Image: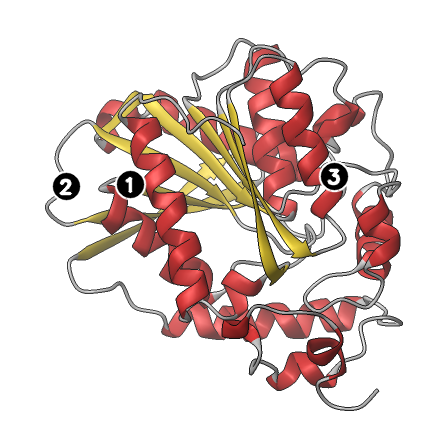
């Protein structure tokens, strides 16, 4: 594969035309995910996160939560230094195929959300590489911890939203289902960015994008094999939200999908199912983009516009204003 193949084959937005670097040199059509590759990637991300410092006017704290099985779940909390008490909170589940950790850009975006929305952002560092249902349990445990400690954390427990991208979108959706089914913490809103929702991999975009940049069907199949290697324990809906028999009585949602992404159609279908179940939902399919464009290239104009849109949606949600009607 010649350099830039993936980026020249697809009709990317003009703001993404010149991106490439490492990603343009890797042929993901036949890429095999191995423990060594996961380890190297996570070490690289870890180093970048270690060097990441809070932006001016931003405060960062880390907390450790005990999971139900005695494991440790860390969270990173970002908040503006002059934020008012009883602030809204965004619980953020990062992507990475359930095996990759948060990246420096995850923390940069979290701080943009915190400053623009005037909220607290809790990044959940769920255990990586563990089979289902451990990551779901970690993510739900973090939500329960935030809700139970809302007063101490200066959070309005009636204004807690969950946000997730890609695999993190699957976890955010699973948390809303668990909170509903367990009569757990109140979630006022869910924001799902190119979410993983369907384990069957049966939608057209999964057959269409076998060599797309950022993510593709080959990688997606390996992700499911790793994540579900211990089975679904009779509860597939918390692994793949499209398996849920009902999506009624879930919080309002914003679903964002990317045009050049194998996950596109299952994300769109999940938004449709939410709407059919009577859940207020806004669907935004962004043309010319691919999975992870906002994580890898988080400083260009297109990403700025996309993040601005997300911030506006969350501001309205925290102000308890209705969503923009679906077109």
Q: Are marks 2 and 1 in contact (CB under 8 Å)?
A: yes
**Label 1 – label 3 distance at C-alpha:** 30 Å
Closer to the camera in the image, 68 or 8? 8
**Label 2 – label 1 distance at C-alpha:** 8 Å
Residue 120 badge:
1
> Residue 263: x and y, percent?
73, 48
Residue 93, placed above or below residue 37: above
Q: Quadrant location of the N terminus?
A: bottom right
Which residue matches tag 3? 266
Closer to the camera in the image, 92 or 309? 309
Corner quadrant of residue 56: bottom left
Secondary structure found at label 3: helix
Residue 5, placed above or below residue 174: below
| Residue 92 falls left or right of residue 245 | left
> Residue 22: x and y, percent?
64, 83
Mark 2 and mark 1 lie on one chain; the one further toward the N terminus is 2
Q: What residue appears at the point 59 percent right and 44 percent down from the top-left corner?
A: 168
Q: Are marks 1 and 3 in contact (CB under 8 Å)?
A: no
Secondary structure found at label 1: strand
Q: Residues within 10 Å of mark 3 (few under 14, many from 20)?
A: many
Secondary structure found at label 2: loop
Residue 83 badge:
2
Q: Residues within 10 Å of mark 1 (few under 14, many from 20)?
A: many
> Residue 288: x and y, percent?
61, 62
Mark 3 and mark 2 lie on one chain; the one further toward the N terminus is 2
> Residue 287: x and y, percent?
59, 56
Residue 265 appears anywhere in the view? yes
Mark 1 and mark 3 lie on one chain; the one further toward the N terminus is 1
């Amino acid at each position: 594969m010649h350099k830039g193949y993936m980026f020249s084959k697809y009709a990317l937005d003009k703001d993404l035309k010149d991106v490439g670097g490492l990603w343009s040199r890797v042929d993901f059509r036949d890429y095999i995910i191995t423990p060594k590759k996961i380890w190297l990637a996570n070490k690289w991300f870890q180093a970048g996160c270690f060097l990441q410092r809070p932006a001016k006017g931003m405060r960062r704290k880390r907390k450790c939560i005990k999971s139900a099985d005695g494991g440790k779940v860390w969270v990173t909390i970002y908040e503006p230094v002059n934020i008012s008490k009883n602030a809204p909170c965004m619980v953020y589940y990062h992507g990475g195929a359930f095996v990759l950790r948060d990246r420096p850009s995850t923390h940069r975006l979290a701080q943009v959300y915190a400053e623009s929305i005037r909220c607290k952002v809790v990044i959940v560092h769920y255990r990586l590489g563990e089979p289902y249902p451990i990551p779901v349990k970690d993510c739900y445990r973090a939500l329960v911890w935030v809700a139970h400690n809302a007063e101490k954390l200066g959070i309005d427990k009636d204004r807690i939203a969950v946000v997730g991208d890609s695999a993190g979108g699957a976890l955010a959706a699973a948390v809303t289902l668990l909170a509903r089914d367990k009569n757990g913490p109140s979630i006022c809103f869910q924001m799902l960015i190119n979410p993983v929702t369907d384990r069957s991999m049966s939608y057209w975009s999964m057959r269409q994008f076998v060599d797309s940049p950022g993510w593709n069907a080959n990688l997606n199949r390996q992700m499911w094999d790793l994540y579900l290697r211990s089975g679904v324990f009779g509860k597939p809906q918390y692994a793949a939200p499209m398996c849920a028999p009902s999506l009624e009585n879930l919080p309002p949602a914003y679903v964002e999908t990317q045009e050049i992404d194998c996950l596109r159609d299952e994300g769109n279908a999940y938004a449709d199912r939410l709407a059919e179940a009577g859940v207020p939902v806004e669907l935004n399919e962004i043309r010319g983009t691919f999975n992870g464009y906002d994580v890898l290239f988080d400083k260009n104009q297109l990403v700025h516009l996309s993040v601005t849109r997300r911030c506006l949606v969350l501001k309205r949600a925290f102000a308890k204003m209705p969503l923009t009607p679906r077109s």
